[in-house]
Image (tube, rainbow, N blue to C red):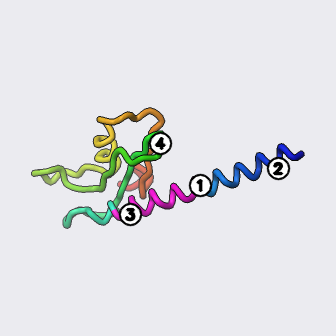
Amino acid sequence: MPRFKYFIQERKKMMNYCDSLFYDCMEHCISLAKQTSLGVRGPYVGAVVLDSREQIIGEGWKDFLPGTSLLIHAERMALDQAATRERKHALLVTTLEPCIHN
């Protein structure tokens, strides 16, 4: 029984840590979403890619492709930035489930 208690305590610590990491990432994603250019229709989306050390290796927001009226999604922008970095076990965090909005 003591092993089980230890496991539960460690699990709670990990969940609190994950909740804190997720909260910080989501807060950053919201600030990125606020960088969306005028003229882009909602929803306004921000996204970050974290590497296995939980460092941001890519970030993005919904915006126009430079010099066009075409849109790039926040997730695509973040993944493009992360493409030059080590992406093994990377995690994408975004303010909106990808492709949920038409």
Residue placed at 50% from the left, 61% from the top? 23
How far across and how far down the image is residue 15, in percent? Answer: 64, 53
Residue placed at 20% from the left, 67% from the top? 38
How far across and how far down the image is residue 57, in percent? Answer: 36, 44
Residue placed at 35% from the left, 58% from the top? 45
Q: Secondary structure at mark 3?
A: helix
Please give the label number shown on residue 30: 3
CB-based contact (under 8 Å), mark 1 and mark 2: no
Magenta-highlighted residues: 18-31
Specify the principal SS of the magenta part: helix
Q: Name the residue that disc number 1 marks.
A: 17
Q: Nearer the viewer, mark 2 or mark 3?
A: 2
Question: 85 or 38: which is nearer to us?
Answer: 85
How far across and how far down the image is residue 25, in percent? Answer: 45, 57
Mark 1 → mark 3, Cα distance in angstroms: 20 Å
Residue 85 found in image quarter: top left
Mark 3 → mark 4, Cα distance in angstroms: 22 Å
Asked if residue 85 is positioned above or below residue 7 in the image, the reply reads: above
Residue 30 on the magenta segment: yes
The single residue placed furthest to the right in the displayed view is 1
Please give the label number shown on residue 5: 2
Mark 2 → mark 3, Cα distance in angstroms: 37 Å
Q: Earlier in the sequence, mark 2 or mark 3?
A: 2
Quarter placement of the C terminus: bottom left
Number of numbered discs on residues: 4
Q: Earlier in the sequence, mark 2 or mark 4?
A: 2
Residue placed at 43% from the left, 45% from the top? 50
